[in-house]
Amino acid sequence: QKLRSFHGYVCGGDYLTGGPDCGRAAGFHVDRAVREAVLARLSPPVLRVVHKEWREAKALEQNGQRRRDLAVHRARIAVEEAKHRALSVDRSLEHVAAELNAMWEEAQKELQRLESEHDAEPSILDLFDEQSWNDLLTRSQNVVGIWDDEATQDRDRKELTRLMVKVVIIE
């Protein structure tokens, strides 16, 4: 059995300047209230809302990806058309040939720009997929059990608490 130390929380008030302190609270009661608040925020319904938002963001990202794919496809066609025009012009028309070559080069630069954007680093939304979400939702059905499990370390509990609790006010 894990032994827990007894502790408490003190509001110093004006004690350091000769005045009274403003209160004391048993650590067990404060810790229990904070634990309940953290566990309530980790509940599966909250995760379901996050999952729904992730799905919507993923759908928007996929629409954006389709638009980028289409832009790259159109740029490739523009390069091929510009190349065809530049190579098929009568070379005796130097001014026209130079203009068409410049258009071809510009189309190639635009294609390279679009391809580099297209191949940019993967989205943070790719860290999860539907199976990952289903696993997380299944595992989170017993958040209290995970929190209280002996394998869950205090530093993990503290980390979760710090992420979700900004301030504790005792009245």
Image (cartoon, helix red, strand yellow):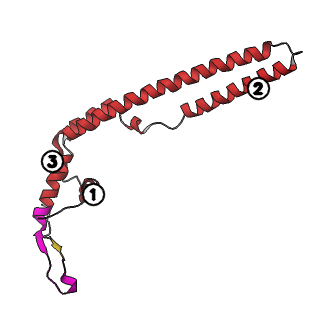
Against 62, residue 44 (above or below) is: below
Q: Residue 61 lies in what quarter of the image?
A: top left
Q: Residue 72 lies in what quarter of the image?
A: top right
Q: Position of residue 152 (x, y in %)?
A: 23, 53
Earlier-in-chain disc, 3 versus 2: 2
Residue depicted at 33% across the width and 34% down the height? 54
> Magenta segment: does it hold 60?
no
Callout 2: 10 Å neighbours few (<14), some, many (20+)? some
Tell me if residue 105 can be seen.
Answer: yes
Disc 2 residue type (three-letter): Ala
Q: Residue furthest front?
A: 95
Front-most of 133 and 51?
A: 51
Point out the frontmost of discs 2 and 1. 2
Against 18, residue 93 (above or below) is: above
Q: Position of residue 107 (x, y in %)?
A: 68, 25
Q: Which residue is mark 2?
A: 102
Q: Which residue is mark 3?
A: 144
Q: Which numbered disc covers residue 162? A: 1
Residue depicted at 18% across the width and 77% down the height? 13
Which residues, given as a range, are shown in magenta? 13-30
Against 127, residue 88 (above or below) is: above
Earlier-in-chain disc, 2 versus 1: 2
For mark 3, give the secondary structure: helix
Front-most of 5 and 58?
A: 58
Callout 1: 10 Å neighbours few (<14), some, many (20+)? few
For the residues labelled 2 and 1, say whether their Cβ atoms are less than 8 Å apart: no
Query: Between marks 1 and 3, how big is the CA–CA gap?
Result: 17 Å
Point out the frontmost of discs 1 and 3. 1
For the residues labelled 1 and 3, say whether their Cβ atoms are less than 8 Å apart: no
Q: Position of residue 151 (x, y in %)?
A: 22, 52
Callout 3: 10 Å neighbours few (<14), some, many (20+)? some
